[in-house]
Every structure is written in C-alpha cells, then in structure tokens.
Image (tube, grey):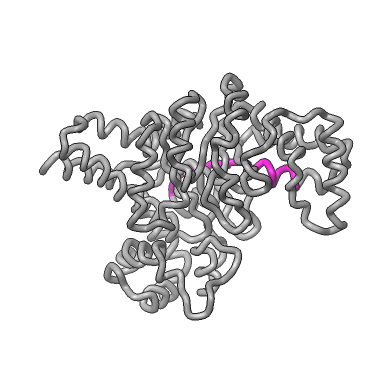
C-alpha cells in the first residue's frame, strides 16, 4: 500500500468532532420540505427544478444512496422512494452512523421547536452532544419578559444560567447587522434606550427579532466576557445575509480588542472569504476557522475551498464542522466531502514529497478533532 493509500484509509476512518451543527428534524419531512431544507433557502425551488439536480443533490445521490441500499448516483425518484420506504428513523440512523462523528456541538438557536435537542441527537446517533448557545436567540427570549430597564440584568442572569452547560456561544451578527459593526461595547444608558426602541417596534405577541446594532453589540461583549469559544457566522448563508458585509476582516478592530480577553474567535463557513479568514487566523492567536456549510453546497468543487483554508492559517487553527441542519443527508455529505478533500490535499503533498506521513497524520487529526477538543475542552480525544 502506498503512502497516499495509507493516508486515504486513515482519513476515511478518523473520528470527528463537529464543532458547529444544528439539530436533526424531529418529524419526517415531506418532499417539498426536504427540498427546501436541503437548499438552505427561505423559498421552495421554481416549478420543475429540484435540489437533486444541484451540487448537494449530486452528493446525496452519490454518497447517501448506497447507505440506503441503492446504487451510487441513483435517480432522484428512486432515492426519494427508497427513503420513504425505509422510514425517517431508519434513514437517520443509517446516514448518521456513516459520519464518524463522536461529538456534536449543536447550535440550538435556530428552529429549535422542530429539531432534536442535543441529548436527543446523542441518543439517536450514539455519539455525544453539547450545546452552543446562540446569543441573539437568548436575548430575544429574555426580552419577551423584560422591560427596557430590566433587560441588561435579566440577560446577564440568563447568560450565567446558560453558561453552566454551554460549550460555547454563537452570534449571527453577520445576519442581523453585518461584521462592520462598531467594535466598542455600548454604555448602559445607550443599551437601555436601544432596548426600549426595540421593544416599542415589536407589537404585542409578535416575535422579538433582534436587529438593533447597539443591543447586538451589548450581548456580544457580554458573551466575550464568558471567555468561552465564540462562533461567528461568516460569508455563505441564506437570504438574510448581505454577503459583502460578511467579510471577517470588517471586524478586525473587534478581533484586535479581544486578543487578551480569553475568548477564542471561531470563524464559521467563511466562503467566499476563506483567504481573509486564514489571514486573521495567521495574525491573531485567538482566531480559528472552518469551511463548514459550504462543503455540501459546492459538491465536487469543495476540495478547492478546503485547500484555501490550508493556505495561510496555521494548521492547528483549522477545524471540521458540517453546519448541517435538519436532514441526516447534510451531515453525511458534509463529512464525506471533507474526507474526500483532505485525501486529495494531503495525498498530493505526499506524492510530491512535500510532507512526511507522520506530519500529515498529525495535521489531519488536529483538524478532525484535536483542535476542537483543545479549544472547547471536551475531553473527547
């Protein structure tokens, strides 16, 4: 067996920590629901179009079909029919068991009412699971029962309570405002006024969607104070994102200001700003990155994006994540595509004599689990 073949076998079996993902759907999706979730879109596809005829759809039919006793690259019709015949629970167990994930860190702040909790994810997968607390969702929950004057203390109390079990925190500042935010923490009177305006704009019974930049900055700095990993959505996302404002270099002053705070800044997804994220991880000791989410949506081109992450970032700053939501297919494809990309990258380096087999194995283990284990303190290794 060649060094490249040995390395490919190692990558195929290396255990993973998924440091950023979402819950699985609790109920079987209809075909329309499946297509919409798989597309990560707010709207269904146009008539006559299907997610199965896209990069993620090809990946599903290639990687997931054999796990459901179909040939690789099965037709969309046969895939959906087989999925329905097996049933939601059986499909979930088969596909999730293929991932090699030993620990899921689940962001519970998105559609938690229709997805499994971390303990439920652990039960259905046989792996372990922990919670990543989304600070905007926590603030919206607090605001539903607080006054403008009472919000700050109520949020601090809720954050302290969440911190007893939280593995880390997540912010969607990129969605709700942009990463070009004022890096300074706002003063208390400014926060009280902003919360009052936010509450006044939300009619009784309406969802309290937080988009006020002052309140967003306030809760962000409170999360920094917890000195746990703080995840930032970066780049690729759904229709709420204004992409050019999701370049992580736009928050360089914030990153500078938090260097000695004890917080680790975890840049998620990063496409098309992978080189920019790599630069920040190179320069600032507390910055890390992954290429989750975009893996499955770029399909057979995903190795190019993973390759970019190994361009300027120190190898111990690069992590694996799936950013999978809802469908077990997204977990299965995200992990399979990551393994394919890593095999290609490190296989080429080995063939050219640019790296030793021992160094290659070490760097792969760092990305697969050891960096996440070290940063989040999970004791999973």
Q: Is residue 103 visible?
A: no
Q: Is residue 203 visible?
A: yes
**Would you identify the image quadrant in which residue 36 lies?**
bottom right
Residue 136 x/y as whole percent: 69, 44
Residue 339 x/y as whole percent: 31, 48
Residue 231 x/y as whole percent: 56, 38
Q: Quadrant of the N terminus?
A: top left
Q: Residue at x 62, y 40 (%)?
A: 179
Q: Which of these two is toward me, 297 or 336? A: 297
Q: Residue at x 54, y 51 (%)?
A: 22
Highlighted magenta segment, given as a residue range: 126-140
Q: Is residue 102 left or right of residue 180?
A: left
Q: Is residue 367 left or right of residue 12?
A: right
Q: Is residue 159 above or below residue 271?
A: above
Magenta span has 139? yes
Q: Is residue 52 above or below residue 239?
A: below
Q: Residue at x 61, y 21 (%)?
A: 261
Q: Which of these two is toward me, 241 or 145? A: 241
Hey, which residue is sitting farthest top in the picture? 260
Q: Residue at x 39, y 36 (%)?
A: 369
């Amino acid at each position: 067996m060649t060094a490249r073949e040995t390395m490919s076998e190692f990558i195929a079996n290396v255990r993973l920590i998924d440091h950023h993902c979402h819950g699985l759907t609790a109920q079987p999706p209809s075909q329309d629901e499946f297509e919409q979730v798989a597309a990560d879109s707010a709207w269904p596809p146009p008539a006559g179009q299907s997610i199965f005829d896209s990069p993620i759809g090809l990946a599903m039919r290639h990687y997931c079909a054999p796990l459901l006793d179909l040939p690789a690259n099965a037709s969309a019709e046969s895939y959906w029919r087989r999925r329905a015949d097996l049933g939601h629970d059986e499909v979930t167990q088969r596909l999730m068991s293929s991932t090699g994930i030993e620990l899921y860190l689940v962001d519970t702040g998105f559609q938690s009412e229709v997805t499994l909790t971390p303990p439920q994810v652990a039960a259905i997968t046989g792996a372990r699971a922990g919670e990543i607390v989304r600070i905007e969702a926590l603030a919206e929950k607090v605001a539903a029962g607080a006054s403008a004057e009472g919000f700050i203390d109520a949020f601090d109390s809720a954050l302290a309570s969440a911190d007893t079990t939280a593995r880390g925190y997540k912010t969607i500042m990129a969605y709700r405002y942009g990463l070009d935010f004022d890096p300074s923490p706002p003063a208390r009177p400014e926060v009280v006024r902003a919360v009052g305006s936010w509450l006044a704009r939300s009619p009784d019974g309406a969802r309290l969607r937080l988009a006020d930049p002052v309140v967003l900055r306030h809760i962000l700095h409170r999360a920094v104070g917890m000195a746990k990993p703080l995840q930032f959505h970066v780049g690729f996302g759904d229709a709420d994102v204004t992409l050019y404002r999701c370049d992580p270099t736009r928050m360089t002053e914030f990153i500078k200001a938090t260097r000695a705070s004890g917080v680790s800044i975890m840049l998620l997804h990063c496409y098309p700003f992978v080189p920019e994220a790599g630069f920040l991880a190179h320069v600032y000791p507390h910055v890390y990155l992954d290429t989750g989410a975009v893996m499955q949506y770029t399909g057979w081109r995903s190795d190019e994006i993973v390759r970019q992450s190994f361009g300027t970032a120190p190898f111990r700053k690069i992590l694996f994540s799936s950013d999978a939501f809802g469908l077990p297919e997204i977990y299965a494809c995200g992990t399979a595509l990551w393994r394919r990309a890593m095999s290609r990258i490190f296989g080429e380096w080995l063939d050219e004599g640019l790296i030793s087999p021992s160094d290659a194995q070490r760097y792969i283990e760092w990305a697969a689990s050891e960096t996440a284990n070290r940063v989040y303190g999970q004791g999973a290794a």
